[in-house]
Every structure is written in structure tokens, then in C-alpha cells.
Image (cartoon, grey):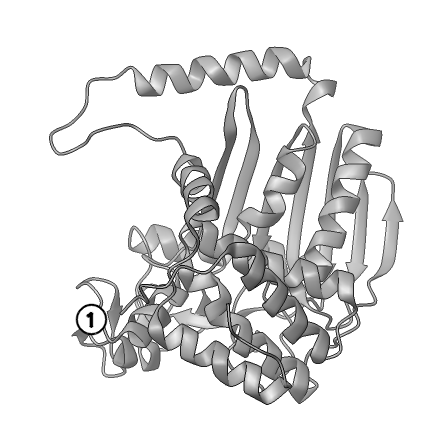
Amino acid sequence: MASATRIPADKLLDFASAVYAAAGMPEPDAQLAADTLVQADLWGHQSHGVMRLSWYTARLKAGVCAPVARPETVVDAGGLAVIDGHDGMGQVLTAHAMREAIRRAKAHGVSAVALRNSGHFGTALYFTLMAAREGCVAFLSTNASPAMAPWGGRKKTVGTNPWSWACPAGSHAPMALDIANTGVARGKVYLAKQKGQPIPEGWALDAAGRPTTDPAAAIDGIILPMAQHKGYAIALMMDMLSGVLTGSAFGPRVTGPYQTEHRSGAGQLMIAIDIAQIQPLAEFNTRMDQLIADLKSVPLAQGFDEVFYPGEIEARNATRNRAEGLALPDDTLADLHRLAEGTGLTSRW
């Protein structure tokens, strides 16, 4: 159940920042990591919001994630770079790497930055939008702990391995895609479990390989790929880009954010293209306005009120939720209160 109380986003950000700082993160890094969570809630993706604060904090306290990030550039080849994250917070490392990708794209037209020994970072959208705001088209891939079986198998060895694209969109909020290769992000299954709700049929199989609507059984079982064999194949390619190519962990060797026994090993690959070195940015934006106008001019199918472009719903949600405040599930609020008690902070909003 969602609480009737709406929490101002800024107060939630201050609280999450304080929790991270209490776990040893420098203040600017704590602020950034907290912002990635609150922004996910603002976008309407509570599966990747402050629900995860206790997960990340537990990993910091367990010592499997370094609270002070020390990214090291181990390959510097102009438009290409490789960064070793030395097991710092994935959010901090990926933001650092994306800033490098943007800088190098501005200098060389296009850049590719490989990040190894990183961690789970929440929503990929947060980082590709950094580049879109700087006049770039950006791509980001990451790998994740096993969630689904290879097509035709029954054992989890393949992660959800999300990926994201983002770009400016003229007079509109940026166009942005952020998807996992499972039919649904695993965080949404955890959110359903926290809310005490069943999951839809077709999301998952239990440990015995039977279809299930029980989120707990789904977590212990297998999350199904999107588009059947196609989702599996895309996930595998994202693992190649994020894990094998970057020199990080891959396949079943990647550890998820919800356990505290092992380092993450996750890797990321990001590509940035400086639009202005292909065509004037103003011209690109005019063309994007036309693309979106074309989408919105089509006749509507039955049951639909509007056509949306990728990222538009999140932008609208963020505007509304920032004005009205965030309504969090009761279990998430209880979890935040427990965090507050454990760190000597106040969770009164």
C-alpha cells in the first residue's frame, strides 16, 4: 500500500544523502548517489528509487563496495578510454565515466568509455541524460547478476543487462530509452513483493520452471526475457559489451545490489556522439521536433488517449511529483525509518 503522505523530493534527497554520508561516502558523492534514487522515484520508477537505499548502504557497510570512489584511467587513447572503478559505488563511477565520454566526444566527435570493476547504478537513464543535456547522443550498457536462463535452459546465468539511449528532442524533454532485456526489470518484482501484490502472468517462472504470479517465487526462480529468444540474445550482447569487452565480470560472476557477500564486478560501456560535429544542433532539434510531431499526428488506437515518445512519461511524472511530493509504499517508508534508527538520523519528513 502507498502512504497517503507525500514527501517533498528535496527532503527525501537530504535524508538519503545523509544515510550515504554516514556510511562513509564523501558529501558530493553521497548527494549524487542519493539523487539517482530520488530521481527514479520522481520518474515513477519506484523499483529503482529509495526502496534500494538500504541495499546499497548494506553493501557499503559490508565492505564489498568502497565508499570512497577512486576511478583510475588505465587506457587513454583520445576518443577511447578504459577506467577501472576499483569497486566504488556504481552511480559515482558511471557519472564520472559519462563526463569523460562527453568531454572526449566534444574533442573527437565520438567517444567510447569502458568502465570495469564498477557496480549497480540504478537507472541507466540518469546517465545518458547527462550527455543529452550537453548536446550529445549517448548510449550506455551495463551487465547485472543472473536473472534469466539462456533461451532453452533452466538455470539463471544471464543478467537483465539494461541499456539506454538518450538525445536532445528539440522543444521537448529529451528522448530517452532505458530498458532491461527481461520482460520486466527485476526491481519491479521486488517492488511487488514489498507491496504484497501478485505479479502479472508471463513475468516469471518459479524454481521448478512453472509460471508464477508470486513475486517471492519469481525472485527465487527465473525472470523471463522480453520477446522470448530476442531478449535473451540482446542481453547476451550487452554482457559482451559491458563485461567481456571492458575487462569486468560477466555472466554468473556478476553480483547484484541486494546481497552483501561479494563485490559487484559489474561493468559498463558508454558511447557519446557530439551532434554539432555531424550537423548544427539547432537543425537536429528542429528535425527532432518534426519526428515527434509525426508520431503524435497519427490516429489513436482504441483505448489510447495519446501517443508518447520514449522518456516523455518520465519527464511529465517528474514535473508532477516534484510539485506534489512522492507517495512511497508503506514498506519502503518502514525501511527508511529503520535506516534512520540505525544511523542516528531522523526520518521525519
> Residue 34 sits in which quadrant?
bottom right
- Mark 1 is on which residue type? Pro
Residue toward you, 299 or 153: 299
> Residue 210 sits in which quadrant?
bottom left
Which x, y percent locates residue 42? 46, 51
Residue toward you, 346 or 87: 346
Which x, y percent locates residue 38? 53, 58
The residue located at (50%, 38%) in the rendering is 176
- Residue 321 lies, with reference to residue 48, above or below; the image says above
Instruction: Describe residue 3's horizontal placement relative to residue 56 as left or right.
Output: left
Instruction: Describe residue 320's horizontal placement relative to residue 166 as left or right.
Output: left
Residue 237 seen in render: no
Residue 73 seen in render: yes
Which residue appears farthest toward the front when viewing the image? 348
Which residue appears farthest toward the left when viewing the image? 302
- Residue 324 lies, with reference to residue 209, above or below; the image says above
Which x, y percent locates residue 116? 72, 63
> Residue 201 sits in which quadrant?
bottom left
Quadrant (top left, top right, bottom left, bottom right) of the N terminus = bottom left
Instruction: Describe residue 212's horizontal placement relative to residue 106 as left or right.
Output: left
What residue is disc 1 on? 198
